[in-house]
Amino acid sequence: MPNAHILIVDDEPDIRAAVSDILEDEGYSVALAEDASMAQTQLQVRRADLILLDVWMPGMDGLALLRHWHSVAGSLPAPVVMMSGHGTLETAVEAIRLGAYDFIEKPLSLDKLLLTVENALQTQRLAQENSRLRRENGHPSEPLGDSALMQALKAQAKHLAEKDDWLLLLGEPGSGRQSFARYIHHHSARRHQPFVVVNAANARRQALGGSLLGQEDIVPPKGGSDVDTPDTGAERRRVRYGLLEQAHGGTLFIAELAELDKREQTQLLHVLTGGSFTRNGGTQPVEVDVRIMAASALDLREEVNAGRFRDDLYQRISAHGLVIPPLCAHTEDVPLLLNHTLRRAHEHDGAPLCTLDAEAMAKLCAYPWPGHVGELKNVAQRLLMLSQDGHIGLHEVQQALGGRENREMRVSERDGWLSLDLDLGLPLREARDDFERAYLEAQLRHSRGSMTELARRAGMERTNLYRKLKMLGVKDTFQRDDSDE
């Protein structure tokens, strides 16, 4: 596992030095600790990918440290390989029971040590990869589309993947920004490292800094934590690794970059220029190697002019960009996208296998798709519910679209009142959707693109607001990027 960071915990200086030299010669980065307290300090400085832990140490021994991690965090901070010159079968069994990956005896065999380290890191990488695949749950390995526009865009993305620069993906929410970010990561030299996503627009403001940058706190003697200093007289600190550290060696995709506050923007700029940042509540810089890709529904240049976004960060992150076109610019890909969505619903969700007749497909290809791929997925879900024996015709498509493609709503505003001409022949649900769409579009204009202000005006929680905007296909809004395929 290239660039893996290994923590060696052993009270014997000669062993620490010898093992460190061996691992550094193999290309690993190494941190050293002589006891449990120093091990915790090193884990505060940098998250480890693997821990080599001696069993017998003065004060808190290796097995006690394993139990401590379980008691305060419920799990180990990283895979652990135990080392001992006085090992017994009972000791080895107890170490494995407490979650250790393996147990090796001293004097250490060079070949055995390197093989165990490699296997432990490989097992961890495969576990992370399986977890990632479960989260993606059938997401396509590349953006879908065979049109000339999409083929050219994927070629451009592959070219950007060869570099390691920060990247700004431009395009409307729902157009496929995250999908292209994953595609670029998959074709980059970082492909075997984590791809971590944070949606700044969806995160609760009070929690965003902690999730992105991590958190350090001084805790009471019996406070639980992810990583907690043993009770050896040292100050007890709780450390939670943020998404930047979790993405170390890989890629961090930040959806809705403009939602970061000035402090978080400054921290990102420090990562870009110096490869380090400081956790919230911390005092020491944390080194990290991560590629940042970002997207924003707001015009960042306008945000800079309004004083809400740092100009120096904008200049650095906008130096390399990829423009993702709206779905209406490549509607020849609509049949492929629809068939993929319907087939995926059948294979993963147990929905009946449905097909669209030629008239229904022609109607959908002519629709402008203001909500882009996100709206297409929602329409596909409606079609599944409306289908008759696996058949989807023109009538089902018209119902799924709610007649919006043929209906021009007349909306006017005066003295804070919204006037909307509704078709009273519509079913109640479709009429309500029309009103909510017009209402939110009007409030969005008054909010001048601020989702915080829009949520306040509408009296809605932000997560529910994003879901509503996406469902209604409201344009020029922030929408959830976790389905931004």
Image (tube, rainbow, N blue to C red):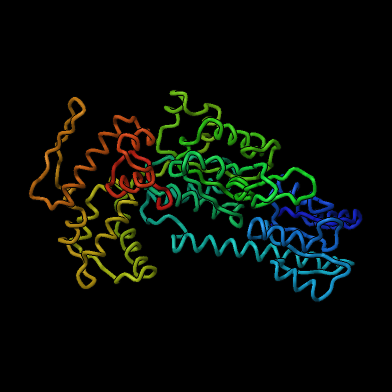
Residue that extends furthest to the right in the rendered view of this protein: 14
Q: Is residue 264 visible?
A: yes
Q: Position of residue 174 (x, y in %)?
A: 37, 47
Left or right relative to 186: residue 326: left
Rendered residue at 59%/46% (across/down): 242
Q: Quadrant of the N terminus?
A: bottom right
Viewer can see residue 169:
no
Task: Name the residue: 31% across, 34% down.
Answer: 457
Foreground pick, 395 / 208: 208
Residue at point 82% right, 55% down?
Answer: 25
Above or below, 21 against 93 in this view is above
Seen at 90% across and 67% down, the residue is: 107
x, y (%) of residue 480?
A: 40, 47
- In this view, 359 is above or below 478: below
Which quadrant of the structure image shows residue 474? top left
Q: Quadrant of residue 477?
A: top left
Q: Position of residue 15 (x, y in %)?
A: 89, 58
Q: Is residue 83 above or below residue 330?
A: below
Instruction: Tell me where residue 379 sits by quadrant.
Output: bottom left
